[in-house]
């Protein structure tokens, strides 16, 4: 229990930094300088007002200096990142530290992608391009195959995952544009799936694509029914791929076993 509490606190602290990334990266700002400040009055946030989760609740979601409302997304990001870090330790806690840190990095990058894509409908290269390289390095050295956890993923499967993730989605983009005369798949989605392939391998790409497409379709149908959105409305795909990636990471082996024995 103590380990989970420590990991939760660590995840919440990193989540606070993720909020900086989510706010600044789409605007082309540095994520290092200046220190955290209120988006409304631009006054620096005092250290005691920047305690993850606790400060947001204590201040009731408002800036101490100007009283302006702070988006609840800040609280969500800190809490979700903390929970996912605990989940990583719970699921993979019998493995060594580099393994844990690799998956911490993976789920945190997916959180940043999700919130940026929801808000701006973009997936920044500043996340995915370094992520592709990092995924290949980690996949070649420390990360296991999520579908056969007793085996190292390895360089070749990780590289094939990158090529599969990027290649399949690039093909969808080309064919979709040719068929519908408009962009069917964004470049950010292509690079994101290349990164996912590096972390999870080609089987993870297939499962993530299936789950992400299923979730996106369900949400799309609900939006059409409830809000009257047209079939041609643009819906960010990155968040659903991110959810599919997390499910593939945590339950890839279980999905595979279910598929094998259900046949």
Image: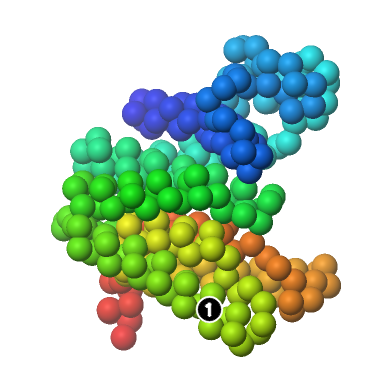
Name the image colouring.
Answer: rainbow
The residue lying at 21 percent from left, 52 percent from top is 140
On screen, residue 80 versus residue 102, left or right, reads right
Left-right relation of 8 to 22: left
Mark 1 crowd level (few <14, some 14–19, many ≥20, 10 Å Cα): some
Position in image of residue 152 (x %, y %)? 17, 55
Identified at 40% across, 48% down, the residue is 131
Residue 219 image position (x, y, % from top left): 66, 68
Residue pointed to by mark 1: 174
In this rendering, is residue 17 above or below 142? above
Seen from the viewer's position, the closer of residues 2 and 172 is 172
**What residue appears at the point 38 percent right and 41 percent down from the top-left corner?**
104
In the image, is residue 45 above or below residue 32? above
Res. 104 visible in picture: yes
Residue at image position (40%, 56%) is 195
- Give the quarter of the image for residue 246: bottom left
State the residue in front, 41 or 70: 41
In this view, 114 is above or below 47 = below
Q: In the structure shown, which secondary structural element does the residue marked by tag 1 occupy?
A: helix
């Amino acid at each position: 229990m103590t380990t989970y509490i420590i990991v939760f606190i660590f995840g919440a602290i990193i989540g606070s930094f993720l909020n900086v990334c989510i706010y600044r990266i789409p605007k082309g700002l540095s994520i290092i300088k200046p220190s955290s400040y209120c988006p409304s009055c631009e006054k620096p946030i005092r250290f005691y007002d920047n305690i993850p989760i606790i400060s947001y609740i204590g201040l009731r979601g408002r800036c101490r200096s100007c009283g302006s409302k702070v988006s609840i997304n800040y609280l969500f990001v800190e809490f979700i990142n903390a929970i996912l870090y605990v989940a990583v330790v719970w699921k993979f806690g019998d493995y060594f530290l580099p393994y844990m840190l690799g998956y911490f990095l993976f789920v945190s990058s997916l959180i940043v992608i999700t919130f940026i894509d929801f808000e701006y409908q973009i997936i920044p290269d500043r996340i995915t391009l370094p992520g592709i390289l990092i995924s290949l390095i980690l996949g070649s050295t420390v990360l296991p195959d999520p579908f056969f956890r007793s085996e190292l993923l390895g360089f070749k499967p990780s590289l094939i995952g990158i090529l599969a993730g990027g290649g399949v989605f690039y093909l969808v983009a080309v064919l979709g544009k040719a068929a519908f005369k408009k962009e069917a798949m964004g470049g950010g989605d292509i690079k994101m799936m290349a990164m996912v392939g590096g972390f999870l391998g080609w089987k993870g790409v297939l499962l993530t694509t299936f789950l992400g497409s299923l979730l996106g379709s369900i949400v799309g149908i609900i939006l059409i029914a409830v809000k009257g959105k047209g079939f041609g409305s643009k819906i960010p795909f990155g968040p659903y791929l991110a959810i599919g990636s997390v499910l593939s990471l945590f339950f890839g082996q279980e999905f595979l076993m279910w598929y094998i024995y259900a046949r």
